[in-house]
Amino acid sequence: MPVSARECYTELPSTQAEAIARARAGAPDGLRVVAERQTAGRGRLAHTWSSPPGGLYLSVVRRAPPAGGPILSLGVGAAVARALAERYSAPVRLKWPNDLLVVQNGRARKLAGILADEVDTPAGGRAVVVGIGVNVAAPPESFDPALRERIVSLAEFVSPRPAVREVEELVAEAIDGAVAALDRPGAAGTVVDACRRLLYGQGLPATVDGSLHGVITALGEEGELWLSTASGPVAVRVGDLVVEGS
């Protein structure tokens, strides 16, 4: 869809917070909020998102599709993963529920993270604000030392390094495609199937919230993750997943 508006900032606390405020105030469908740097970038479950210059920090306001929740963030993740793989030959996988990883030589490192927040609009409908951070070309030394071994940037395996604006256009198009797909009746099953093909960790041991232990077996029809545990199959709908050995 055409870009109805694009707001670009040198610095923001959070593109997601700014876009949510805009959506609640009646922002047009398709509004993009972009920042070169975030001072209070937000991840899932109150995690922070390190946001030095050289990354893409983007939030998009869209009319909420009928199928939302976990399927929306997973569907966006799968669409962005496919787009990056096609453009840059990047070996991108989808980690439940909202991360994109590059897996090389058995090592998984984070490339991107996704948020999806639904809010009420002044017109009485619902909007979804899809936020994404992509490590495009920020130098490793710009991240906290504890993060450097766990993240990867496109610049590490794409030559010449892509421009952030180029990645923005690619990612924004993928987000629009994912939201449009979920707006079609009966589309959720097709989106889940696409996510299953890219799911990282199936067959590997994992821990949720530091207490639930099991082996990842499947992605369910509603976007839930199934684990085989000592007490039987368990469906996980929310939580902090750590895939062991990654």
Image: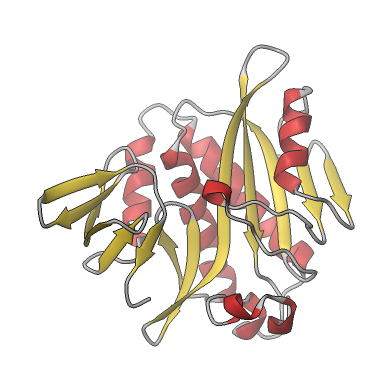
Q: Residue lying farthest top?
A: 124
- Residue 3 in the figure: left or right of residue 73: right
State the colouring used for the structure image. Answer: secondary structure
Residue 217 seen in the current view: yes
| Residue 34 x/y as whole percent | 79, 51
Camera-nearest residue between 177 and 192: 192
For this orientation, the residue located farthest to the front is 211
| Rendered location of residue 219, percent (x, y) | 28, 50
Q: Is residue 202 above or below residue 22?
A: below
Q: Residue 241 vs residue 150: left or right?
A: left
Residue drawn 80% across and 36% down?
A: 4
Quarter of the C terminus within the rendering: bottom left
Quadrant in which the N terminus is drawn:
top right
Q: Is residue 63 above or below residue 168?
A: above
> Toward the viewer: 182 or 204?
204
**In this view of the protein, which residue sits in the foreground, 116 or 196?**
116
Q: Judge whether residue 152 can be spotted in this image.
A: no
Left or right of 112, for residue 239: left
- Residue occupying image coordinates x 37% and y 64%: 242
Farthest left residue?
231
> In the rendered picture of this protein, how many numbered marks are placed on residues?
0
Question: On screen, 41 above or below 191?
Answer: below
User: Which residue is farthest right?
Assistant: 10
Image coordinates for residue 140, horizontal then vertical, percent = 68, 82
Across and down, in percent, residue 182 comes to 47, 35
